[in-house]
Image (spheres, helix red, strand yellow):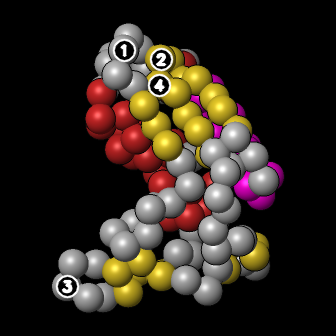
Amino acid sequence: MKATIFPKRLGDYSAKATIRLPENKGAGAKVCLREIAKMRLAKMYHHPIETGICGKSDDGHEIPINTVGRWLFGTPGYMGHIRVTNWNGLDAQIEYPKESPELVHTLITDLKTVVEAGER
């Protein structure tokens, strides 16, 4: 599969979505959504991309930002392009760049469908 070229960094978080979680996750909502995306939407999450950038692990090893999931959710040393808040109730508020490649918009839409359908 040929890698898609992705921008290194987009600055805005103007695209918004709400995902109803099965329970309040608080600060762990982003991790919860990332894990569901990895398991249930693996093909999109692991879709190869090219960015030319890397995160960095605590022991100094580079982590290439070479999948849609790493670009969106981040890695150590690379903050990613998504903000997730879930302080009140079950609704997680998602913010990500409106100018994201179409695959990112599709991943968010499909993640909402999977989570709200209760599919794990």
Q: Is residue 60 magenta?
A: no
Mark 3 secondary-structure assignment: loop
**Residue picked out by circle 3:** 59
- Point 29% across, 35% down: residue: 27
Distance between the Cα atoms at labels 4 and 2?
4 Å
Mark 2 secondary-structure assignment: strand
Instruction: Magenta stretch: give its range.
Output: 100-113
Q: Is residue 10 left or right of residue 19?
A: right
Q: Is residue 41 left or right of residue 99?
A: left
**Residue picked out by circle 4:** 92
Q: Position of residue 83 (x, y in %)?
A: 49, 43
- Point 39% across, 25% down: residue: 86
Mark 1 secondary-structure assignment: loop
Q: Amino acid at mark 3?
A: Asp
Instruction: Using the rendered image of the protein, determine whether residue 55 is visible from the camera's viewpoint.
Output: yes
Q: Position of residue 63 (x, y in %)?
A: 41, 80
The image shows residue 70, relative to residue 83, as above or below, that is: below
Distance between the Cα atoms at labels 3 and 1?
36 Å
The quarter in which the N terminus is drawn is bottom right
Q: Amino acid at mark 1?
A: Asn
Mark 2, residues whose alpha carbon is within 10 Å: few (<14), some, or many (≥20)?
some
**Residue picked out by circle 1:** 88
Instruction: Using the rendered image of the protein, determine whether residue 1 is visible from the camera's viewpoint.
Output: no
Distance between the Cα atoms at labels 1 and 4?
8 Å
Q: Position of residue 49 (x, y in %)?
A: 66, 74
- Chain-order first, disc 3 or disc 2: 3
Q: Give yes or no for contact between labels 4 and 2 (Cβ–Cβ under 8 Å).
A: yes
**Residue picked out by circle 2:** 91
Dominant SS type (magenta): helix
Q: Quadrant of residue 66?
A: bottom right
